[in-house]
Amino acid sequence: MAKNRQPISPRPDIGQYRWSVTSGEMAHVFVPRYFYSDALHAKASGSLGESGYAILRSLAMIAIPQLEQSIDHVVAPMSTRAREIEAMPKGDSRLEAERAFERLGRATHWEVVTRLGIVVEQLVALIAAYEAFEAGDKAGITRGFLRHELDLLKMLGQRPRRRLSYWEAVVQMPTIEDLRGGGLETEEANLLRSGYRTAARQMLTMFDRVRTYYTPALHQIYLRFKHGYTLVDPSASLLRLAGDEQQSQRVQALMQGGFAVVHLSRSDEVIVNLVRSDTDEFNQAVGATEAAVRLCNDFATAWLSRVEHAEGKSLQVVADPDHKDAMVVALRKWVIGGLDTSVPFDAALAVSQATGEETS
């Protein structure tokens, strides 16, 4: 694996040339100049390895934002069409439009659930890579990122990640003594520590939402999307399931406004997962998917800012809007000594403002 690097760039405002980490041939890496330098690369790749650092940085700056955009593209037509129908006069045309909207809603719900599966798979890979990093297993970082046979449901359900202390470690929440030793006044130290804790608490809240919503049935929907389209729609096909009258009524209610996914168990038994599809369930799926994307974003940026900082300090804090300016001052004092001098503080800073909206 080649480690020689060529810092020459004909257009430094766009990117820099680097050796390919696999073949030794020149490759053009597009990165904003003010977010990147050779010093950052040397520091972070020393912690993560060349491949691990490249993957984490690409996730934080490109892949996860693109995932967020793809979800918006899926959901946006629903909102647009709903407004159009609302403006239509009552009559046969509106009734037909409403029926078509129901079909669009179910198809969009299917797409949202598959997007959720994609994001959960990315989240679990991010967790696996991060935990390899914490364990000092540099080779395991890249393996964690690239392995996709991980047991998603098992990873989501394990207890350590359901504790606030896990996410406090992700954001590298400092102690008051550390902050005071870093030159902060007591009031500043308390304010900044609360910002780190709020960031950790929000990440735990989002993780819990994803963990509790992403059920085995939804996971099977995602797997069927990946490995074969076995959606059964009652408007197109009849599906008879064994069961008593009460079970049959429940199944009928689900199937009237939902869909079924058929798959094989490990013992070759045919399993049918029924998923309701209505406005409430659709909104739940969208909310869980958005939470998963935001969690991936916060996780990746917290880890990235930590490994790029000379003293291993994360910039992932949440500031109350009423104290944002004071938080920025305190954060600057805390991290400025370990930032690359070629990176302006305002460009490196990733302070999230609490909107007051519920994240659970």
Image (cartoon, grey):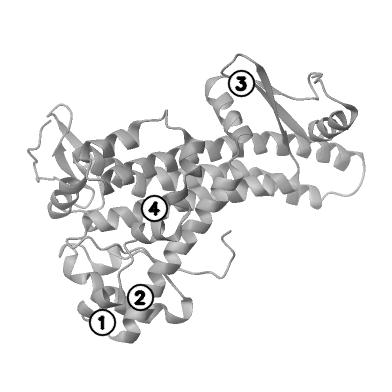
The three-letter amino acid code for the residue at tag 4 is Phe
On residue 229, the disc is: 3
Q: Is residue 79 left or right of residue 308?
A: right
Which numbered disc flags the more N-terminal residue, 3 or 4? 3
SS at badge 1: loop
How many angstroms separate mark 4 from mark 1 (CA)? 26 Å
Answer yes or no: do the residues labelled 2 and 1 have beta carbons within 8 Å? Answer: yes
Q: Quadrant of the C terminus?
A: bottom right
Considering the numbered disc 4 on the image, is that residue within a helix, a strand or a loop?
A: helix
What crowding class fits label 3: few (fewer than 14 Cα within 10 Å), some (14-19), or many (20 or more)?
Answer: few
- For the point 38% across and 61% down, the residue is 168
Residue 248 against residue 204 in the figure, above or below: above
Residue drawn at the location 54% of the way across and 50% of the way down: 290
Question: Residue 184, which numbered label?
Answer: 1
Point out which mark residue 299 bears.
4
| Residue 177, picture quadrant | bottom left
Looking at the rendered structure, the kind of residue marked 3 is Tyr
- Work out whether mark 2 precedes mark 3 in sequence or the reverse, and give the earlier one: 2
Give the crowd class for mark 4: few <14, some 14-19, many >=20 residues within 10 Å. many
Query: Of callouts 4 and 1, which one flags the residue occurring earlier in the amino acid sequence?
Result: 1
Q: Secondary structure at mark 3?
A: loop
The three-letter code of the residue at mark 1 reads Leu
User: Looking at the rendering, which quadrant does residue 39 occupy?
Assistant: bottom left
